[in-house]
Image (cartoon, coloured by chain):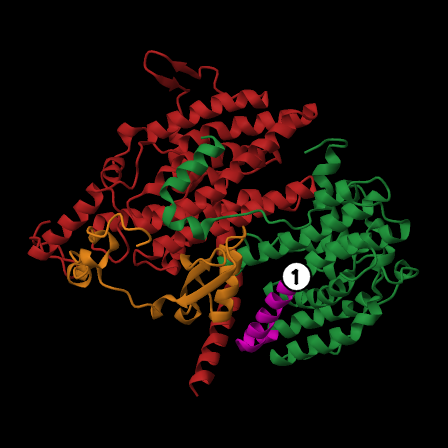
């Protein structure tokens, strides 16, 4: 059946439902628009955009693994939405960064080596059980929400536009993580204990998120210095954990330098899986 | 029904006056092409047929997520990764729309889920084949979703209201699924030799199973007649298969690829498509649980259910605590 | 699996745009109101279908009994004087 025929057929017997199933693509900023209309960023801005793109890409790759494995079907859909949002952010930032080097989002995602990835350690940490994923989401989404909120005011218009869309989505991811943290923290003894464990294994990667690196220098008014977000982040996550009957764990901090291309052992496997097919067919389009 | 058979409550061997009246009202709704709604009286067999059909359909959506989820993390471009993720997520959504319709028949989703996990319930046998290559994402979208749409569009007019409404929603979203599959194959067929070969191989593997998605030939499909009379089904298995094979025979030319069926042609005299004999023995074997991936598919569902138990329990416990503190 | 871990069923209503009523879209399972609302957003508005959502616990809905259709919905039948089309004598009078 032709697409138009199908639509017509459906409309004819879907009258009563028409208003509840009317769909529109919306008019938000898409990676494709950035590729076409985007202004070329400077080398410094591109390197900064790459860090944001890499964080989002690796996190999206992790989150996408959940679809078809979630604790309940409704949660498959919820996690799917979150993974799709984050992948969208990755595509936008990578597309923008790539303009500086005449590289596409795919060239950056599939053809760089592990040491060229600038993502944080927290995003490459394995999904673990649902509680680990939720705590990772809590840590990252509160961070990204603060970050994108500020970045939406950046003097760099493209970074500002990508962030202005992203911040609304991340705000929802944050809410999702908070809702679950509270339920699992306050649910059963088993769930509370699993959440305490999740906090312990992920907390060592918190400090890295807030470390100012070389890539953040010389971008006053354009980039956000991560260290400036720490106070607000601490305050917010402490309050959420308190509501959930949980506490910040007394763990040390890992010497994590993802921004410099030094990664935990997890990233290699993640990239091997992500890149395997594309690399088998150099020059192919899909 | 023989008088010695144990009776279901409220049912007597001889229909009462009320039952006759109810049956007459039901028949009139079907005759007038109106819709039966959840709280209407309906014959027990109608309820069971629908309950089985809608839940099987829902299970198929849920199990059907797996072959494609298998390629999300390896999708060869970020755009394809987004599309595939959205599609697999839609399938979870479709499963939920359908369980939602099925629950109006008086069976809970937990019960349906139990039927699936215990291996008692059936689902579309095609999902018991492994998705070996990226091209399978194309073949599944084009052929499997294509066959599903051909099957499902008439179901939008099914006599049971909630089923029809769920199907309208499903069909609107499915139309994107088939197109994206076709475009994956189109890109591959215009690509390198290796890509083209991958595309042809996927079509070769999915062609026959997709034709069998419409079910056994009409003369071997005993339940179809009753479903047609109840206006749950609007076209027979063979009618739908004919329509589908006619469409893909044309579409494959655009791809520059072939269907693995040299004898496929339209017989002008009989006014029908003649295709190869389908391997119904294999079909039955797969339905019975002996397909290449049956065990894997079910175990994945069981694992998700098992691993998620503590989460569902915790959320329920939290809700109960909240409810208690509101009362207090 | 204990029975208590079963999440209740919720009905979802979607307002597709301002000026229109909320329309029943389907149902879903969620442990509580807050999660029900979020699940509804994720499940029923993936394609910009809505600007507002309602969720109601299915067990809280009271519905009319289709078996009582005759007595419940008979009264308006035959009262055509409730409709403007009943009034023929004034036909042709402007702005009326």
Q: Nearer the viewer, residue B284 or A115?
A: A115
User: Image check: B253 left or right of A91?
Assistant: left
| Letter of the chain shown green in the rendering | A
Residue A189 magenta-drawn? Answer: yes
Residue bearing the label numbered 1: A168
Residue positioned 53% across, 36% down in the render: B141
The quadrant of the image that shows the C terminus of chain B is bottom left
| Letter of the chain shown orange in the rendering | C
What is the drawing colour of chain B?
red
- Tell me the chief SS of the magenta region: helix
Examine the image and state in which quarter residue C20 appears: bottom left
Which chain letter goes with mark 1? Answer: A
Q: Is residue A159 above or below residue B132?
A: below
Q: Is residue B158 visible?
A: yes
Q: Is residue B306 visible?
A: no
Magenta residues? A170-193
User: Image check: A226 left or right of A200?
Assistant: right
């Amino acid at each position: 059946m032709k697409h138009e025929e199908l639509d017509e057929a459906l409309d004819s017997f879907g009258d009563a439902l028409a208003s509840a199933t009317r769909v529109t693509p919306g008019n938000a900023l898409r990676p494709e628009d950035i590729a076409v209309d985007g202004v070329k960023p400077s080398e410094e801005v591109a390197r900064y955009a790459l860090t944001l793109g890499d964080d989002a890409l690796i996190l999206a790759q992790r989150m996408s693994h959940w679809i078809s494995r979630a604790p309940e079907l409704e949660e498959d859909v919820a996690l799917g939405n979150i993974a799709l949002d984050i992948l969208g952010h990755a595509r936008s930032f990578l597309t923008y960064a790539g303009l500086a080097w005449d590289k596409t989002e795919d060239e950056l995602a599939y053809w760089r080596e592990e040491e060229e990835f600038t993502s944080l350690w927290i995003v490459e940490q394995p999904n673990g059980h649902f509680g680990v994923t939720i705590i990772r989401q809590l840590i990252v989404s509160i961070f990204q929400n603060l970050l994108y909120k500020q970045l939406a005011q950046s003097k760099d218009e493209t970074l500002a536009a990508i962030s202005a869309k992203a911040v609304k989505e991340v705000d929802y991811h944050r809410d999702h993580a908070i809702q679950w943290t509270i339920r699992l923290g306050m649910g059963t003894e088993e769930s509370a204990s699993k959440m305490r464990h999740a906090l312990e294994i992920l907390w060592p990667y918190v400090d890295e998120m807030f470390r100012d690196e070389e890539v953040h220098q010389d971008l006053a008014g354009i980039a956000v210095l991560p260290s400036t977000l720490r106070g607000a982040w601490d305050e917010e996550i402490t309050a959420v954990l308190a509501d959930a009957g949980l506490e910040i764990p007394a763990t040390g901090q890992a010497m994590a330098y993802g921004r410099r291309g030094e990664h935990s052992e997890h990233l290699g496997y993640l990239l091997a899986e992500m890149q395997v097919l594309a690399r088998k067919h150099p020059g192919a389009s899909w | 029904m023989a008088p010695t058979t144990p009776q279901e409550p409220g049912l007597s061997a001889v229909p009462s006056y009320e039952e006759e009246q109810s049956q007459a009202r039901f028949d009139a709704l079907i005759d007038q092409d109106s819709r039966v709604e959840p709280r209407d009286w309906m014959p027990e067999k109608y309820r069971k047929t629908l309950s089985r059909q809608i839940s099987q359909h829902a299970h198929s959506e849920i199990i059907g997520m797996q072959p494609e989820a298998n390629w999300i993390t390896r999708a060869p471009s970020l755009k394809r990764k987004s599309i595939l993720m959205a599609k697999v997520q839609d399938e979870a959504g479709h499963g939920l729309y359908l369980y939602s319709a099925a629950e109006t028949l008086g069976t809970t989703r937990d019960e349906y889920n139990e039927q699936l996990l215990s291996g008692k319930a059936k689902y579309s046998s095609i999902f018991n084949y492994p998705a070996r290559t990226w091209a399978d994402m194309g073949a599944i979208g084009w052929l499997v979703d294509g066959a599903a749409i051909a099957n499902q569009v008439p179901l939008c007019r099914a006599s049971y209201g909630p089923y029809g409404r769920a199907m309208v929603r499903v069909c609107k979203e499915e139309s994107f699924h088939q197109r994206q599959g076709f475009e994956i194959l189109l890109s591959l067929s215009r690509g390198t030799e290796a890509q083209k070969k991958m595309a042809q191989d996927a079509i070769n593997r999915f062609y026959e199973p997709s034709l069998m998605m419409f079910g056994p030939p009409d003369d071997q499909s005993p339940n179809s007649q009753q479903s047609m009379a109840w206006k749950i089904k609007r076209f027979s298995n063979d009618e739908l298969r004919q329509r589908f094979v006619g469409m893909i025979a044309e579409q494959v030319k655009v791809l520059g690829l072939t269907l693995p069926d040299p004898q496929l042609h339209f017989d002008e005299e009989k006014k029908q498509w003649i295709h190869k004999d389908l391997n119904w023995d294999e079909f039955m074997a797969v339905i019975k649980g002996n397909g290449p991936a049956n065990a894997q598919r079910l175990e994945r569902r069981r694992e998700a259910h098992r691993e998620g138990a503590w989460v569902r329990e915790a959320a329920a416990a939290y809700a109960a605590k909240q409810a208690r503190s509101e009362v207090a | 699996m204990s029975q208590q871990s079963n999440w209740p069923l919720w009905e979802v209503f979607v307002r597709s745009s301002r000026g229109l009523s909320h329309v029943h879209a389907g149902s879903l399972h969620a442990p509580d109101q807050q999660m029900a609302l979020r699940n509804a957003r994720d499940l029923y508005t993936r394609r910009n279908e809505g600007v507002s959502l309602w969720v109601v616990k299915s067990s809280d809905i009271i519905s009319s009994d289709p078996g009582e259709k005759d007595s419940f919905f008979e009264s308006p039948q035959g009262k055509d004087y409730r409709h403007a089309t009943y009034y023929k004598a004034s036909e042709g009078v402007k702005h009326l």
